[in-house]
Image: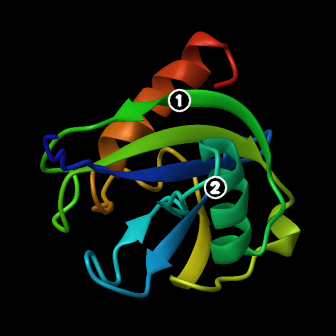
């Protein structure tokens, strides 16, 4: 029997409102400590990616989210310095009034596509954000 090394599975959640504002968290821990990122984290064994996305959003932002759509799957080998990770990214809605940084989040703030242009985001989140922008533009939501 051969041994297979498997990548780690993660989720990222783009929580946005009807005005195309969205939430980013400031990371509390390495890698990318103090960098802005989407809420997200590792999928636990026996957990669906959808459940992990809802759980991670709640843990890091204190917001109960409704997942709207799958953005995509991102699996570049160098996307995470801790090792090979594959992330499943989702669009989600939630009440921004409930936001509070918690768990691995040091801070939380509201951004829009213009305000985030000159901010370095953690991991490959700039690429994911670009894909989200194109999705929302195609759907005529922006």
Residue depicted at x 42% and y 55%: 116
Element on which disc 2 rests: helix
Q: Is 42 left, or right, of 58 in this rendering?
A: left
Residue indicated by mark 1: 71
Left or right, 91 with respect to 66, comes to left
Give the label, 2 or 1, closer to the camera. 2
Q: Quadrant of the C terminus?
A: top right
Foreground residue, 41 or 122? 41
Residue 135 in which image quadrant? top right
Query: Can I make out residue 20 in this image?
Result: no
* Neighbours of disc 1 within 10 Å: few (<14), some (14-19), many (20+): some
The answer to whether any part of residue 110 appears in the image is yes
Classify 10 Å Cα crowding around label 2: few (below 14), some (14-19), many (20 and above): many
The residue at 27%/57% (across/down) is: 123
Vertical position of residue 125 compared to residue 72: above or below: below
Front in this rendered view, residue 128 or 29: 29
Q: From the top left corner, tell me how far across and down residue 60 is, in percent.
A: 63, 75
Q: Is residue 103 above or below residue 35?
A: below
Residue at 60% across, 76% down: 108
* Residue 52 numbered mark, or none: 2
């Amino acid at each position: 029997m051969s041994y297979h090394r498997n990548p780690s599975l993660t989720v990222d959640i783009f929580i946005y409102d009807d005005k195309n504002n969205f939430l980013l968290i400031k990371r509390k821990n390495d890698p990318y400590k103090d960098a802005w990122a989407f809420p997200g984290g590792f999928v636990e064994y026996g957990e669906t990616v959808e459940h992990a996305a809802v759980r991670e959003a709640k843990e890091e932002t204190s917001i109960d989210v409704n997942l709207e759509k799958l953005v995509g799957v991102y699996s570049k080998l160098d996307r995470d310095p801790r090792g090979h990770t594959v992330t499943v990214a989702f669009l989600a809605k939630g009440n921004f009034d409930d936001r509070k940084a918690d768990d691995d989040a040091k801070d939380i703030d509201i951004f829009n596509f213009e305000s985030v242009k000159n901010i370095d985001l953690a991991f490959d989140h700039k690429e994911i954000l670009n894909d989200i922008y194109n999705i929302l533009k195609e759907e005529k939501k922006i």
